[in-house]
Image (cartoon, rainbow, N blue to C red):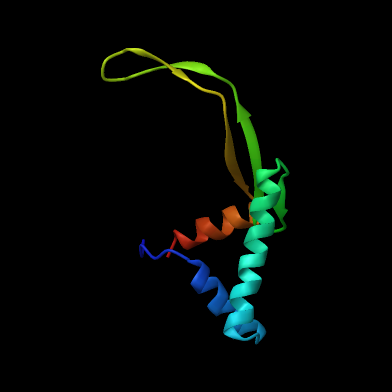
Amino acid sequence: MSGKTLTRMDLSEAVFREVGLSRNESAQLVESVLAHLSDALASGESVKISSFGTFNVRDKAARVGRNPKTGEEVPIHPRRVLTFRPSHLMKERVAQGNKR
């Protein structure tokens, strides 16, 4: 594994090279798309990107957990979590990347 992380800068640079917008316009486009995605998720909507996957917000109920070191019971408060379910195409593409 290369350890490389894809950043906003990398995305805007790819838009700059592939689409031909200026670097500033490319960065604004990437920021706008990410803002729309996060706004939709924050309001509880699902975000489905064809051939990529689906992002969902799930409400988790309160429960009692245990500290594994001490065995002490600890309350875990209710919370909202973000989940991602990759599409079949994405799963296949990632699996093929492991076979190199």
Furthest residue toward left: 69
Q: Which of 39 and 50 is in front in this view?
A: 39
Q: Residue at x 33, y 12 (%)?
A: 72
Q: Can residue 87 be seen in this view?
A: no
Q: In this view, does 48 lie to the left or right of 100?
A: right
Q: Residue at x 59, y 81 (%)?
A: 24
In the image, is residue 13 above or below residue 79? below
Residue 27 image-quadrant placement: bottom right
Q: Residue 62's x, y, as percent?
A: 55, 19
Q: Residue 92's x, y, as percent?
A: 58, 56
In the image, is residue 66 above or below residue 11? above
Q: Residue at x 44, y 60 (%)?
A: 99
Tell me the quadrant of the picture where the C terminus can be found: bottom left
Tell me the quadrant of the picture where the N terminus can be found: bottom left
Q: Residue 71's x, y, as percent?
A: 31, 13
Residue 16 image-quadrant placement: bottom right
In the image, is residue 68 above or below residue 15? above
Count of numbered circles on the image: 0
Q: Is residue 8 left or right of residue 45?
A: left
Q: Nearer the viewer, residue 98 or 7?
A: 7
